[in-house]
Amino acid sequence: MGYFSKIFNLAKEKLNFLWGLRFTRDTLILQVGSVVGTGLSIIASVIYARILGVTLYGDYALIFALVSLVGLFMDWGASYAAITLLAAAYARQDRQEIKDILTYFFKLSSIIFFTVGLAAIIFCPLISQYLYHNPAIGKLARIVLVGSSLQIFFSLLTTLLQVMRKMKYLIIAENVFQFFTILPSVVLVLLGYGLTGIVWGYLAAIFCSIIFSLLVYHKFSRRNNLVPSLLEIFRNFSRVKIARYFSFGFFMALDKNISSLFGLLPLMILGYLATSGEVANLKIALAYLTLPNILVSPISRLLQVQLPKAKEAGVKDLKANFYNSSVYSGLIFVFLMLGSLVLAPFLISTFYGSQFDLSIKLVYPLSLSVIFSGFAIGLGSLYRTIGKNIYSVIINIINIIIGLVLVFVARKFTSPLVSVAILIIYWGTFALGMHMMYIRNYFRKLKQEI
């Protein structure tokens, strides 16, 4: 009994220690929000899949895949630069720097929308015709693209809340936003408006979110002396030069956008080579495999703020923060993924129906691509913190090129769906290994220099 009592006391002490850390408490708060947000998305996807059917649901997936692809060309790093730089400026209580960073965020976002954004909106049907052989998808994608561009106001609010570590307000804001973004689309689909109802409902919700974001931001600017008003930000436009922060954020965006291709390209390649039905089944399978992210993705968000602070404390703290978070989140992810695989046949067939049975068959082989992804939860934040995004870009480009060659070769021997599945598995396993090798060598060289 003494032995078990000792183990119990040690475990209790460890849990008390972890609970005493603000990082742990903030993670749990974000996890609550993640569960709610993911639940809303699942409910919406089930309704869409049931009512639209497998073919139209595939078109729905391709609409948002096209918007995401265009979004890569519109993302020049404004948000990533803002959250990283604001975390440091807020810690220093530097109000002028905070105002300059927020001005840069608005100024760069406006320039992008009125150049790349407008061009994309005009040519979306042509792009859709080339990629999917269906210009109608591009016409609907235009509407979503307008809405996603207007999310700048909500992004400003969530960035500020995250930097201020107002996690309760953050999850409330995000879940309110997601609920009211989904609700109009779901209602219109239930009324029989199909894909048109989804995209117009989304746009209407975005306009409502602008009002919500501006009201909440106004309250924070009045209560917190470090937060400038929107009027101060707009008056500061002429003072802040884009070049001041651009290179810092651009390489972050380049890294993030290339990483996003790992998720986008499989759907787009399949959309080009196969039917909308196969795209729909692949989307359901991939979405199901992301369920364990409900409990580990908040860690990634907090690391965007935590790792820059740890770097200020020293290399030892930075290394410990990264490896500890990677190991714990990775083990949690593996455990959750194994449970998800056991429940896959029941959950997918029950909620989505027999028309998506192919998704069940896809889940098991595709799980090889994500089962260890929890260990990579802090890679992006670490690269940004140490200013080595260029190496992440190089690693990812190598992986993308090899993967595309692999799918081209596999296409000669098997079906498009199997070829794309091989591509996803390759990317998920090989990329993680290369990134971890680089990080290990980076810390080893840093230790030798010290």
Image (cartoon, rainbow, N blue to C red):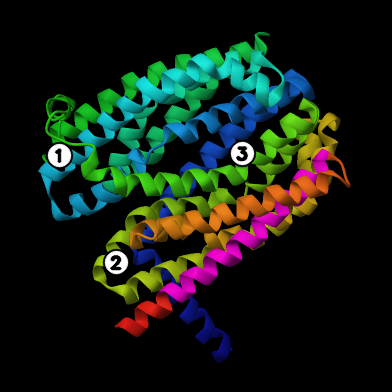
Task: Tell me which amino acid carries mark 2.
Answer: Lys
Q: Looking at the picture, tell me which residue is in the foreground, 16 or 294.
A: 294
Q: What residue is pinned by disc 3?
A: 264
Mark toward the viewer: 1 or 2: 2
Q: Looking at the picture, tell me which residue is in the foreground, 216 or 245.
A: 245
Answer few, some or many: residues within 10 Å of disc 3's Cα (few below 14, many 20 plus, some between 14 and 19). some
Q: What residue is pinned by disc 2?
A: 311
Q: Is residue 11 visible?
A: yes
| Residue 95, image quadrant | top left
Residue that lies at the very extreme toward the bottom in this rendered image: 2
Query: Of helix, strand and loop, which one carries label 2?
Result: helix
Mark toward the viewer: 3 or 1: 3
Answer few, some or many: residues within 10 Å of disc 2's Cα (few below 14, many 20 plus, some between 14 and 19). some
Task: Tell me the residue at 43%/29% (across/down).
Answer: 176
State the separation of the CA atoms marked 2 and 3: 32 Å
Task: Tell me the residue at 62%/50% (across/down).
Answer: 400
Secondary structure mostly seen in magenta is helix
Q: Looking at the picture, tell me which residue is in the foreground, 364 or 164.
A: 364
**Residue 367 percent across, percent down from the top left:** 72, 54
Residue that lies at the very extreme toward the right in this rendered image: 413
**Which comes sooner in the sequence, label 3 or label 1?**
1
Mark toward the viewer: 2 or 3: 3
Q: What residue is pinned by disc 1?
A: 224
